[in-house]
Image (cartoon, helix red, strand yellow):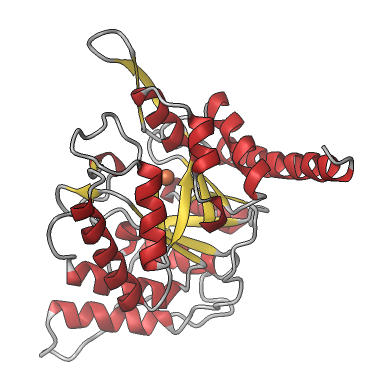
Amino acid sequence: MNFAVGYPVNHGALSFPSELNGQDKEDMTLALESVALDTRLQAILSRAGVGLKAEHYRTIVATRPDIGFFEVHAENYMGAGGPPHRYLTEIRNHYPLSLHGVGLSIGAARPLDRDHLRRLKQLIERYQPGLFSEHLAWSTHDTRFFDDLLPVPYTSETLALVTDHIDEVQDTLGRQMLLENPSTYLAFAESTYSEIDFIVETVRRTGCGLLLDVNNVYVSSTNQRWDPIRYLDEYPLAHVQEIHLAGYTREADEAGRPLLIDTHDRPVDEHVWSLFEHAIGRVGPKPTLIEWDTKVPTWPELKAEADRAEATMVAVGKRERHRAAIGY
Ligand SMILES: [Fe+2]
């Protein structure tokens, strides 16, 4: 594949003045390569997309599949160059992109990592994603693995912390971020807010948008035995700009009760598809991502999940218009 056609990227070895340190070289490499990007196709339409995986780079570049957008984990592209950036640049020139962070630790009781934030800003300037999102969670270390994301107790103290961090992120990046609802396994005894009230107040104080992960709603509701439909009906859907769908693993706790783990390693479950229909029936079609991060399937299998999400949005849209027309 000829990556040079249409956009003159220098993919050869760059030479730097000897006095530059490693960080300066990295910054310069990012700056040089960023010249190449065609930043049209920035807005993400209400279509389905998939997480971009290295296993599918070549197929996507060679076949240009009809798909709404791709999403990447920011932390996987914080290196300076190499094949991941070359493929992402090529793909970004033909598709809108959303950037999903898993390493900012928005909910941690310590200052944000300024170096991480700086790298994030560089990535955003370089790839001009239509959406940027992070989790309502904290991670034990600078990790790129979603299963190291830990929930926060919903208290006044954590609310102040989370809102301060989101303010800092949005001020630094100069753009709105979307906050994703977490998958949880237990409720914190010290929580004084419901998850919904905590999210509503966070949006009110910061002006952030929301990423509704429907699989996380199903996983949390099963583990904690609450009603996912009621959660969706109370959720501030007007602020949702993206939806996530994913697969989970069913296990059992010591008492034999179902324990769902947010593994992103299989197709979306039928219960989650039903909740998705319910959500978009209320909020309308939204950019919807199939998250499949481990045991990555073949491209046709992944694309079929995205096609189902898109067909569901079309069918629900028709149903809702019909209902409106007959006054149902
Ligand atoms: Fe998600």
Kindly indicate the quadrant of the structure image that contains residue 63.
bottom right
In the image, residue 77 sits, relative to residue 7, either above or below, namely above
Kindly indicate the quadrant of the structure image that contains residue 162.
bottom left
Q: Residue at x 41, y 63 (%)?
A: 204
Q: Quadrant of ligand 1?
A: top left
The residue lying toward the viewer, choosing from 220 and 105, is 220
**Residue 173 screen position, x and y as percent:** 35, 75
Please identify the quadrant where the C terminus is shown.
top right
**Residue 193 screen position, x and y as percent:** 30, 44
Q: Residue at x 30, y 80 (%)?
A: 29
**Does the image show residue 211?**
yes
**Residue 50 screen position, x and y as percent:** 53, 48
The residue lying toward the viewer, choosing from 148 and 26, is 148
- Left or right of 118: which side holds 200? right
Q: Residue at x 22, y 67 (%)?
A: 116
In the image, residue 204 sits, relative to residue 40, either above or below, namely above
**Residue 25 screen position, x and y as percent:** 21, 81
**Does the image show residue 14?**
no
